[in-house]
Amino acid sequence: MSSNRIIRTTSLIGALAAGLMSATAFAQTTTAPADANAVPPGMTQIQPPKDPLVERREARKVAKDQYNAEKSAAKAEYKQDVGAAKQERKDANKAANETARQEMQQGTMKQ
């Protein structure tokens, strides 16, 4: 039992030491050199022409975004109109209820 535990402890210590050494080795490495295809500072890179399928996809995305914006604006306007009409109906019903209530009270007082 104790020999098994000693082996585990020594292997654990060895693994920790190896991990620490590799961590320090990674910390000391320099950054990767600049890519050979990279453009030096101060110069502009000329882009190759886009694939027609990519251009079509981008154009469709722009059109879809514009359509969705117009649709959401129209939907918001519609909801506002519906809400205003609903409020008008509520106000009209309240006024009608109030006049009917007053007429009923006057009718009971006359008799």
Image (tube, rainbow, N blue to C red):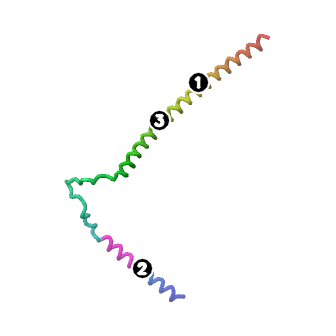
Q: Is residue 31 above or below residue 100?
A: below
How many labels, in total?
Answer: 3
Of the residues shown, which amino acid type is indicated by label 1? Glu
Residue 62 falls in which quadrant of the image? top left
Query: Which residue is at a point 52% across and 88% down the rendered structure image?
Result: 2
Query: Which one is closest to the eye, mark 1 or mark 2?
Result: 1
Q: Is residue 5 above or below residue 82?
A: below
**Tag 1's secondary structure?**
helix
Q: Earlier in the sequence, mark 2 or mark 3?
A: 2
Which residue does the numbered mark 1 point to in the structure image? 88
Q: Earlier in the sequence, mark 1 or mark 2?
A: 2
Quadrant where the C terminus lies? top right
Residue farthest along the top direction in this orientation: 110
Which residue does the numbered mark 3 point to in the structure image? 73
Q: Is residue 108 above or below residue 70?
A: above
Q: Nearer the viewer, residue 31 or 68?
A: 68
Query: Which residue is at a point 38% across and 48% down the rendered structure image?
Result: 56
Task: Tell me which segment is drawn in magenta.
Answer: 17-27
Of the residues shown, which amino acid type is indicated by label 3? Ala
**Tag 3's secondary structure?**
helix
Which residue does the numbered mark 2 point to in the structure image? 15
Of the residues shown, which amino acid type is indicated by label 2? Ala
Q: Nearer the viewer, residue 66 or 1?
A: 66
Left or right: 79, with 92 as reference point:
left
Q: Earlier in the sequence, mark 1 or mark 3?
A: 3
Q: Is residue 87 above or below residue 22?
A: above
Residue 26 falls in which quadrant of the image? bottom left
Left or right: 10, with 47 as reference point:
right
